[in-house]
Amino acid sequence: MMSLTQKLSENIISYILKEQLMPGDKLPNESILSEKLDAGRSSIREAMKLLESRNIVTIRQGSGTYIAHTPGVVEDPLGFTFIEDKRKLVMDLMEVRFLMEPGIAAMAATHADENDIKKISALCNEVESLIRSNSSHAEKDIEFHTAIAMSSKNIVVPRLIPIINSSIPLFIHFTHNQLLHETIETHHEITQAIAAHNALGAKDAMYLHLIYNQKELSQMLN
């Protein structure tokens, strides 16, 4: 049986869906939600804390409560943090990426709109700029692959993003940033294929991107 806080958190989720609120949208304040959901403000507050723990909302002190960037998708849903053998993990993650990412890139090429293409292109250029300035590019690299996944317009793919995101810092760590030129080149090829709505080209470019990573990893780890 659900507690009052759990029940109220589900009511808030229903409200979010009914109002078609999107990631980054701000929720009404406690007073308004209290009136809409017929609940006390303290109960609303506790329900929001529960929703925050489930990564459905983000509470910003002094600003308000917002829909999380990837609602309901926790940072490490598959528990990779607790896998001790990181060498085995990074190679197995690469195998999974081969299964997923070329197909995702093809879907992105098929479905990406003008705004998606602008975002992917901008992130591609930002990654290159960071690499050429010898700055850390892991965060922007993650955003680049995330933008491609979101452009697929497949509602399941964004839920797979944590698998991709958790692998990128590991790849960069184990390859010691040896693939800088290859990263720039293949990122541009992926971006150009998506912009041209060339599904096969995007798939092949992403496959080549992963081949470079796999080859370098094998040399480093063996």
Image: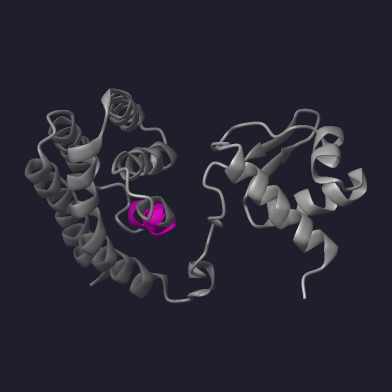
Q: Which residues are magenta?
A: 160-172
Foreground pick, 57 / 213: 57
Queried whether the magenta region covers residue 143, the answer comes back as no
x%, y% of residue 41? 90, 43
x%, y% of residue 181? 19, 38
x%, y% of residue 119? 34, 27
Instruction: Check the image and tell me how it is coloured.
Output: one colour
- In the picture, which quadrant includes the C terminus? bottom left
Q: Kindly identify the residue that appears in the image at 78 percent across and 55 percent down.
A: 8
Queried whether the magenta region covers residue 171, the answer comes back as yes
Q: How many marks?
A: 0
Q: Kindly identify the residue that appears in the image at 66 percent across and 36 percent down.
A: 66
Task: Please say if 188 is above or below 48.
Answer: above
Q: Is residue 198 left or right of residue 167?
A: left
Query: Quadrant location of residue 122?
Result: top left
Q: Is residue 47 left or right of residue 147?
A: right
Q: Kindly identify the residue that appears in the image at 20 percent across and 33 percent down.
A: 191
Foreground pick, 38 / 85: 38
- In the picture, which quadrant includes the N terminus? bottom right
x%, y% of residue 94? 27, 63
Q: Main secondary structure of the magenta part?
A: helix
Q: Is residue 180 left or right of residue 85?
A: left
Task: Please say if 98 is above or below 201.
Answer: below
Q: Kindly identify the residue that appears in the image at 29 percent across and 55 percent down.
A: 175
Foreground pick, 55 / 27: 27
